[in-house]
Image (tube, rainbow, N blue to C red):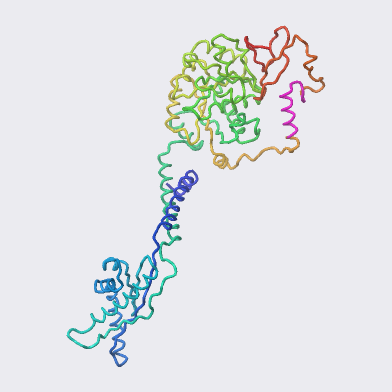
Amino acid sequence: MDLRDYLRVLSRRWHVIALVALLGTTAGILASVFATPEYRATTTLFASLQSGADTSQLNQGNAFTEARVQSYADVASSPKVTGPVVKSLRLDITPAQLAKRISAEAPLNMVLVRLTVTDTQASRAARMSNAVAARFAQVIRELERPEKSKSASPVRLTVTQPATVPSAPSSPNTTLNVALGLAVGLFLGLGLGVALETVDTSMRDSKALAECLAGAGGPPVLSSIVQDPRAVRQPVSLRDDRHGPRAEGFRKLRVNLQFADVDQRPKVIAVTSPLPREGKSSVSVNLAATLAEEGARVCLIDCDLRRPSIAPALGLVRDAGLTTALVGQAELHQVLQSAGSFTVLTSGMIPPNPTQLLGSTQFGSLLHTLAEQFDHVVVDTPPVLPFADTAAMAPAIDGYLLVARAGRTSRSQVVDALRILERVNVPVLGAVLNGAPARGEGDAYGYAYKYRPKQNTTERLTALVSSRFAAVVPGRGPAAKGHGAPASAKTRPQNQVTRPVFVDGLSPSVVPSPPNGGEPTPGQLRLGSERP
């Protein structure tokens, strides 16, 4: 991995790295909070020779003392020092335990010895340090005294700075513990992020999906649809933001589909995915809306008889649809509903045998009829890997469109789905990456979908109010200028009845239907069991 790979790991796995770093910092804080405070008291002693009259003898004595002081440090924790100190202070610890609390330091080229004692009580640490220093000086005098001689020791240790009661504990060091915990957490988080990135086989951008398809000999990536949290509330991106990143992504898909198969342009396009919850239904709805944007007649069919989702997303009736027409309970034109710019054939009642129903000749005849009536037919199908429904309807399909979700669909799942679709001898027109990161896809091309026409706020508000008012009250609005207001309920002819019409995914409106049982206007839903 080079530097760019590590930066990519930081950008993708930053939440993991931040979480582990936070855990490390928390561990450092907890270690400081629950640790027992310890105090350190230091006593400084000066070593000197008591003999020497002239300068040369003093210099020799000073060199002798410096060399001996280095050995004195080890004597401070010897039993000869710790034993009497424990007994004199009546400590509840052993001489060996006291020795572990004593540290002696003899700086180079100096004749000083610093004795430091650590304890959980500040006052006791000071008393122990002074007692150890006094006993230490006595032991050194005894060791330096000539054997079988009553003369004094030539070396004398004098306390120059006695220990005082420390005002603050020396440990725990909260700042050091927090910094150490943060550093260890960042290091472990980076390692965990690299490990997760190594074992992660999901595709995060369109480049990874294109490489996966190229390696499997599959089709190209036709478009990349960015992630937008508003897509749940606004399933049709063209109506939410006509010049937003999602809308532009679907326009790119529409343009690339025109060049997918120039010799035989597909009319019936099946949209599928390897597994559920990868956004195939959202792609189907927006593809139909984008194709209809050019003025083409488009029909969207919900063939996902396992878990249909188009009808609730667009606010349409689900119980009367595809299965209703296949079993002969209604004519095809009676169950077609309007979603504004395109027509929708919902799933109908969920059957017990979806695979047999979608593979039947009646289903093929129904798609053939719709292909003659419409310029484009978009079919939302079940996922490929769990079910055989998508492969069963292959004889009636002109081409498949494979949808993969960024960060969710793995490379192996895409390859397996591609192999299944290739066995039915129906071309896979291309792939779509759904839920791609907006920043990553925009930065890859040097822009972030900020190029859009400017529109006055008042104009946008007026257009929105006019469109909604025209949708809720048919016969009013810009298209009905010059016409009178609709007849009221009191003056409406008795031979007229009302039926629901679903416009633009809104709530049902009421419009008069033609008398004498005439054909309904486009967008109306008429069933044999319909009641006025």
Which sits in the foreground, 501 or 378? 501
- Does 340 sit left or right of 94 as displayed? right
The quarter of the picture where residue 162 lies is bottom left
Q: Residue placed at 32% from the left, 67% from the top?
A: 101
Which sits in the foreground, 11 or 153? 153
Which residues lie in the magenta part? 461-478
Q: Find the residue positioned furthest to the front.
A: 90
- Residue 495, given in percent of the width and then of the height, sits at 75, 9
- Does 526 sit left or right of 515 as displayed? left
Which sits in the foreground, 255 or 356? 356
Does the image show residue 273? yes
The quarter of the picture where residue 194 lies is top left
Residue 462 falls inside the magenta stretch = yes
The quarter of the picture where residue 480 lies is top right
Q: Find the residue positioned furthest to the top.
A: 516
Q: Find the residue positioned furthest to the left.
A: 148
* In this view, 149 is above or below 104: below
- Does 504 sit left or right of 191 as displayed? right
Q: Residue placed at 20% from the left, 84% from the top?
A: 146
The image quadrant where one finds the C terminus is top right
* In this view, 111 is above or below 222: below
- Residue 281, given in percent of the width and then of the height, sits at 55, 26
* In this view, 502 is above or below 147: above
* In this view, 144 is above or below 502: below
**Total number of numbered discs in the rendering:** 0
Does the image show residue 107? no
Identify the main secondary structure in magenta: helix
Which sits in the foreground, 147 or 393? 147
- Residue 511, given in percent of the width and then of the height, sits at 72, 17
Residue 132 falls inside the magenta stretch = no
- Residue 423, given in percent of the width and then of the height, sits at 43, 20
